[in-house]
Amino acid sequence: MKSKSRIFVLIIFFVFLFLPIYWMINMSLRTNADILHTLALYPTDPTFANYIKIFTDSDWYSGYINAIIYVTINTLISLTVALPAAYAFSRYRFMGDTQVFFWLLTNRMAPAAVFLLPFFQLYTTVGLLDTHIAVALAHCLFNVPLAVWILEGFMSGIPREIDETAFIDGCTMPRFFITIFIPLIRAGIGVTAFFCFMFSWVELLFARTLTITNAKPISAVMTRTISATGLDWGLLAAAGVLTIVPGALVIWFVRNYMAKGFALGRV
C-alpha cells in the first residue's frame, strides 16, 4: 500500500512538473486568434506556422545563434579561469585567501543591476558594445565565482598525495594538471559547465542592455512579440519551446557527471 501511494505522489509530481511545458507546446501549435478565442487542452487544428516563422526569420533564428555563441564563450572562459584559481584555493594557503574567496562569492550575491551601468559605459568606451564577447565577459562576473566555489569543493576531495607523487616522479605542473588532475574532477567540471551554461543562457538584463542588433540573444528577441494588439502568444510559446532544447541537451550530455557531482561536490 505504501508503494502505491509513493507511485501516486510521484505521478502527481511529474504532472505538475511537465504541465507548463506541455501547455507551452500546446500553445505553440495554435494561432494567436485560436489561443485567445477558447481554452483547449490540445490543439484541434495544429499549425507549425510559429516554428516556420522562427526558422525563416533572421531576426529570430539569429537570436539563438547569438545566444549559443556567447554562452559557449562564457562557459569556456569561466572554466579556464576557475580551474587554476580553485586549485590554488584548494592546495595552497596564502595571506588573505579566505577573504579573497569570500569576495568572489559576494560578486555572485550582488544584483546584476549594480554592475550594469559600469559595464555599459566601459564597453561603449572600448567599442565592445553589441558584441558576443561583451556579454560573455559580463557573465563571467557571476559565473567565475560560482565555478571556483564548486570546483574547489571537488578538488579538496582529491588527496594531496596524488599531487606529491606526481611531482616526485618528475611530472611538471601543467602536465599533471591536464593529464592527471582534471580527469579526476571531470564530474565537477561537468556540473560547473552546466551551471555556467544555464545562467548565461537564461540571463536577460545584461544580454538585452549590452546588445543592440548584431549580438542580440533570443531572450531579448522574445520581448519583441509585444505589439499594439498585445502579445503574440503562439510565437512566444514556440520560441520558449526551442529555448528549452539547448538546456535539455546539455543536461543529457552531462547527466552522469551531474549525478556524481551532486553526490560528491558542494552543489
Image (tube, helix red, strand yellow):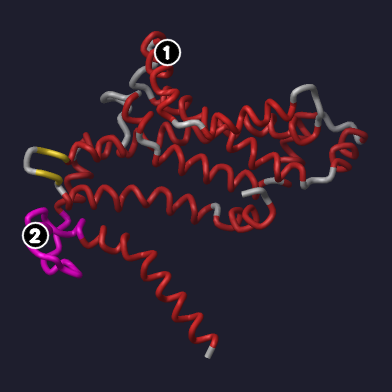
Kindly identify the residue that appears in the image at 42 percent across and 76 percent down.
Answer: 11
Residue 87 relative to residue 47: left or right: right
Query: Is the Cβ of the residue at disc 2 closer than 8 Å to that at disc 1?
Result: no
Kindly identify the residue that appears in the image at 69 percent across and 54 percent down.
Answer: 264
Disc 1 crowd, CA 10 A, few/some/many (<14, 14-19, 20+): few
Quarter of image, res 216: top left
Residue 213 is one of the magenta-drawn residues:
no
Disc 2 crowd, CA 10 A, few/some/many (<14, 14-19, 20+): some
Q: Is residue 217 above or below residue 138?
A: below
- Secondary structure mostly seen in the magenta stretch: loop
Amino acid beneath label 2: Asp
View extreme (top): residue: 125
Q: Which residue is mark 1?
A: 122
Amino acid beneath label 1: Leu
Q: Which residue is mark 2?
A: 34
- Secondary structure, mark 2, is helix
